[in-house]
Image: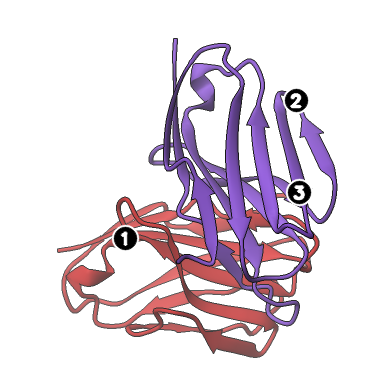
Amino acid sequence: NAGVTQTPKFRILKIGQSMTLQCAQDMNHNYMYWYRQDPGMGLKLIYYSVGAGITDKGEVPNGYNVSRSTTEDFPLRLELAAPSQTSVYFCASTWSMNTEAFFGQGTRLTVV
Amino acid sequence: KNEVEQSPQNLTAQEGEFITINCSYSVGISALHWLQQHPGGGIVSLFMLSSGKKKHGRLIATINIQEKHSSLHITASHPRDSAVYICAVPRDGATNKLIFGTGTLLAVQP
């Protein structure tokens, strides 16, 4: 199993540009999440999904959008990038509350 | 007061020492995750506990559901154990959204 695969690993964006962070899992997990981690801070939930076709906002959704057209993929879209979106982004998935959570390797994004 | 509290926030140990990191939570349901993050690195799941005790190599995790408390122990610590250790609990069973502790930064010196 590949687990959770995130791409790209690094990216530099200019202010106002857009991009999509890709996240894919091959474990047939229904639950998927996007988090951001600012330097020295904990993980904050951006968006989550409990299954294909279902998404909902987390704590810090402004400036982001997601879609979940398949069980496997959960892309995160940044529209009009801003310096405040400079962060490390993690995608995660899990089968249920009583099973292990799997995290992607992270995407380090810098907006200049 | 944070819903998931970890202690200590920072810990420095000498190689070979026995290490304990504690996690107490006031919300969430009956499961807890221990995660590890090396500096600049990804996040790795160490344990998911819903009762009792689990052991993996030099790592041992225990949980007391009634007291809402968990501990992560590292035996015979090594410099490669230096990382941030994070506990997290699912807020509910419908969404499984995790509530994260603030993390414990462990440095093991040779």
In the picture, which chain is red? A
Marks 2 and 1, how far apart at CA: 33 Å
Q: Kindly identify which chain the residue marked by label 1 belongs to.
A: A
Residue A64 rendering spot, x and y as whole percentages: 38, 81
State left or right for residue A107 relative to residue A18.
right
State left or right for residue A72 relative to residue B80.
right
Q: Colour of chain B?
A: purple
Q: Is residue A98 above or below residue B21?
A: below
Provide the residue designation for mark 2: B57
Front residue (pair A29, A23): A29
Residue A104 rendering spot, x and y as whole percentages: 56, 54
Mark number, residue A87:
1
Q: Say what amino acid the circle numbered 1 marks.
A: Ser
Secondary structure under tag 3 reads strand
Q: Say what amino acid the circle numbered 2 marks.
A: Gly
Which residue is painted at 78% across and 58% down in the image?
B65
Q: Quadrant of residue A53?
A: bottom right
Q: Is residue A36 above or below residue B95?
A: above
The verdict on a common chain for dots 3 and 2 is yes
User: Where's the N terminus of chain B, which quadrant?
Assistant: bottom left
The verdict on a common chain for dots 1 and 3 is no
